[in-house]
Amino acid sequence: MNNSILVKLNNAGFRHRDKWLVEGVSLEVHKGKIVTLIGPNGSGKSTTAKIVLGIYKNIKGTVEKYTNKIGYVPQKIAIDWTLPLRVNDFMVLTDDINDDAINEALNLTGVMHLKFKNLGNLSGGEFQRVLLARAISKKPELLVLDEPVQGVDYTGEIALYELIKKISDTLNCGILLISHDLHTVMTATDHVVCLNGHVCCSGSPTDVARNNEYKSLFGEQASQILSIYEHKHDHVHSNDGEIKKN
Amino acid sequence: MLDDFFIRALIAGIGIALVTGPLGCFVVWRRLSYFGDTLAHSALLGVTMAYSLEFNIAVSIFFISSIIALILIQLQKKTNLPSDALLGLLAHSSLAVGLVVIGFLSFIRFDIMGLLFGDILAVNKQNLLTIWIGGALILLVLKLIWKPLFASTVNYELAEAEGLNPDRAKAIFTILLAAIIAISIKLVGVLLITGMLIIPTAMSRNLSDNPKKMVLFSIIGGIMSVLIGLFSSLEFNTPSGPSIIAAALLLFILSLLKIKQSIQLKN
């Protein structure tokens, strides 16, 4: 099992000025597995991803990385008007992949027809598909996807999640996924980490859905996606983000 | 052939335009035009240092501009003043200090107008050598850091996440900017160098749909500005540096017509 590990966080945290954006996160991503981070806005999901990627450097705890073939889909990219950039140019941004690989990736995410369009003229959904195509085109060992389907219509969303699952199978790469979509979390994920400034609960999707912390974060309805199982809180979150023990 | 001052001016100008084209693109993309201005203003201090210590002008400009860039980075970390205020502070104080020092060096005759606005017609063979060898080195280094620099210009975090070391590329790019200012001071002078970096690039943006084209058109625009500017300066007896920049402005205005066209086509 150990030689399949791609990245491991040990008790990792990141502080910006006086505030901990996230702390005490431990997780592992293995080859061919999908790990999903869920949690409310500001709970440290993107921060955790950036710790994994090495974008944040002065962190508490440690990151052990066993690969440097990484594909990243950031949550937001703003391309300045002064920089004319076509999809075709964007695909080779960090790696000189050949034209066949570009076409293959664009076909997989269904945006081959946009190859010579300017990035600034794409719709939100089209842009997300291009971002995903770029990340997978270099055949990474670790994919980090921060809300990869935002702005994509419902049917497209399902198709893209199926694609992500397929990518993890065919490329045998590990995926760290940040998602709001609880349905997907439940179906496509091997391991779920529920964050709210720290790890609230983690485990298989079914375990997490039964967890009370999870329910208090996402509401009863969300947890009814799977079964209902009661257990005791050990702490609550106040509005200013403080954690109180019960 | 090189004995003719006008031929030397043309060769110098073309050499500079070949380098300011690609560097100018990054200056515009990364929003560094005022930063370039600050480095250029500090170049005057470099010139005075060169005269008083009888040192190579290009080398001492490069030295002073790099130091100013380092000071800026430190100030950005240590104070709460916004970047534009810091840039203004450094730009004008280094220009002022440079002019004050010139006042003290009364035993040397300075051509202040030449320093501020360029004196391309006084380019000698050694200047040509500095421009072409220095320019070739700048382009070579830029080619080597192109990938990480470009990727981090599009998105810093993407470049960092996928292992491209954008911080190192940024530092090297700053040094390249100081270097182009050092070798091109004779062409357009302290006050107009940033124009040479930015105006052909701005023109080029109006004509391009991808980054490589933009770099190419920016080089062509720079060379055309140099040719038009120098020939008209010979014809109408106008100062060479301002003539080159005015020619660049003219090309930029013409490129706006193309934009207007494509907007009309879209509607």
Image (cartoon, rainbow, N blue to C red):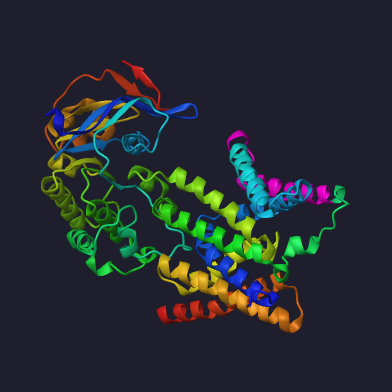
- Residue A12: image x %, image y %? 33, 26
- Residue B152: image x %, image y %? 42, 50
In which quadrant will I find the C terminus of chain B?
Answer: bottom left
Q: Main secondary structure of the magenta part?
A: helix
| Identity of the residue drawn at 65% across and 72% down | B8
| Left or right for B71, reference B154 | right
| Left or right for A201, reference B55 | left
Q: Is residue B121 above or below residue B69?
A: below
| Identity of the residue drawn at 48% across and 81% down | B261
- Residue B127: image x %, image y %? 65, 63
Magenta-colored stretch includes residue A195: no
The residue at the far top in this view is A246
Evaluate whether residue A49 shows in this view. yes
The magenta-colored residue range is: B77-102
| Identity of the residue drawn at 63% across and 38% down | B75
| Left or right for A170, reference B256 | left
- Residue B66: image x %, image y %? 61, 46
Q: Of A221 and B250, which appears nearest the observer? A: B250
Q: How many numbered marks, from 0 up? A: 0
Q: Of B29 and B7, which appears nearest the observer? A: B7
Q: Of A164 and A152, which appears nearest the observer? A: A164
Evaluate whether residue A23 shows in this view. no
